[in-house]
Image (tube, helix red, strand yellow):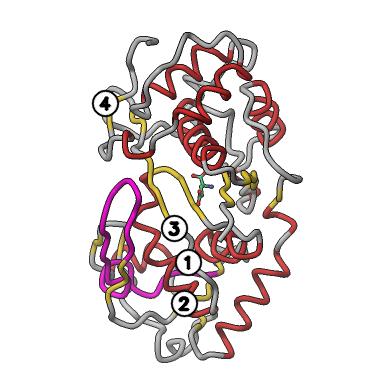
Amino acid sequence: MAYRGRFAPSPTGALHFGSLVTAVASCADARAHGGEWLVRIEDLDRPREAPGAADGILRTLLALGLRWDGAPLFQSRRAAAYEEALARLGALGLTYPCACSRTEIARNGRRGSVGPIYPGTCRHGLPPGRQPRSIRLRTSPAPVQFRDRIQGEQRQDVAAVMGDFVLRRADGIHAYQLAVVVDDAWQGISQVVRGADLLASTPAQCLLQQALGLPTPTYAHVPLAVDAAGRKLSKSLASAPVDPADPMPALRRAWAWLGQTPGPTPTSPADFWRHATRAWRIERVPALTRACIAPDP
Ligand code: GLU
């Protein structure tokens, strides 16, 4: 299958170093394979969106020589496709309405590695007098297995680890898990390279792909950049936005972070990408999360 990769930022703030690492890894991997690289703006969660962030991220990518193929896809325009997928899952008997609030689930659910495990309260029908809030996927116990190109063999029983997860939230917003699966398939993505914070979500996405009869891409999860205290660098942490006016230090730092061998010091983004396309070796990317507060190489 032809290589098609993507970078899928959520526009909750400026592009920061952690996202840049993912963008550089996914773009370098696509270009090294002679593949295409698409950008998708994951702007489903309008209340969390920072005004102007999507534009800012796109402008910063261009300033850093990260040129995407085609037009960026905006998830906010894809609600009909997510509804259609929900309807298909519904027709297969794989969804059900749920009345539980977050507080109730936190109170009644066991704690799993990715948050409280849904205790199944509404699985066999809404409790009397309760109104539907969200829609969930009915999961069944069975391990999902895949081989991550960086993190190696993975195996997870989604029913045990997450339980029946949300496909459409109480506020009507389609859940990330559903949207990402629908869009990766619709855009023909064959290779997903993204942050390791999403490694634990991947089995849920594989389950949805299987249920919807969609292909499963190959995955590679890049180590997370965390701050000195070990916290994930989030885009809302405006402390270290990448400066589009001074692209070279950030590009060099991202390259070193990814364990790649530096070439002769690049003087421009175009120069950097000429080297990166030839020199990229995914085998060199370290599997583990590390603190990113390091001096420029
Ligand atoms: N939108 C997600 C983020 O910004 C990434 C989703 C993905 O790559 O699957 O963390």
Q: Position of residue 254 (x, y in %)?
A: 44, 24
Q: Mark 3 and 4 residues: CB-CB less than 8 Å, in contact?
A: no
Name the kind of residue labelled 1 in the image.
Thr
Which residue is label 3 attached to?
A: 218
Which residue has dot 2 on it?
210
Q: CA distance from mark 3 to mark 1?
A: 7 Å
Q: Look at discs 3 and 2 and give the one toward the viewer.
A: 3
Q: Is residue 272 left or right of residue 50?
A: left
Of 129 and 273, the residue lying toward us: 273
Q: CA distance from mark 4 to mark 1?
A: 35 Å
* Residues under numbered marks 3 and 2 in contact, where contact means CB atoms less than 8 Å apart: no
For marks 3 and 2 on the same chain, the one whose residue lies earlier in the sequence: 2
Mark nearest the camera among 4 and 2 is 2
Q: Which mark's residue is nearer the viewer, 3 or 4?
A: 3
Q: Which mark is residue 229?
A: 4
- Label 4 sits on a secondary structure element that is loop
Q: Residue at x 51, y 40 (%)?
A: 26
Q: Residue at x 64, y 46 (%)?
A: 38
State which region is magenta.
146-167
Contact, mark 2 vs mark 1 (Cβ under 8 Å): yes
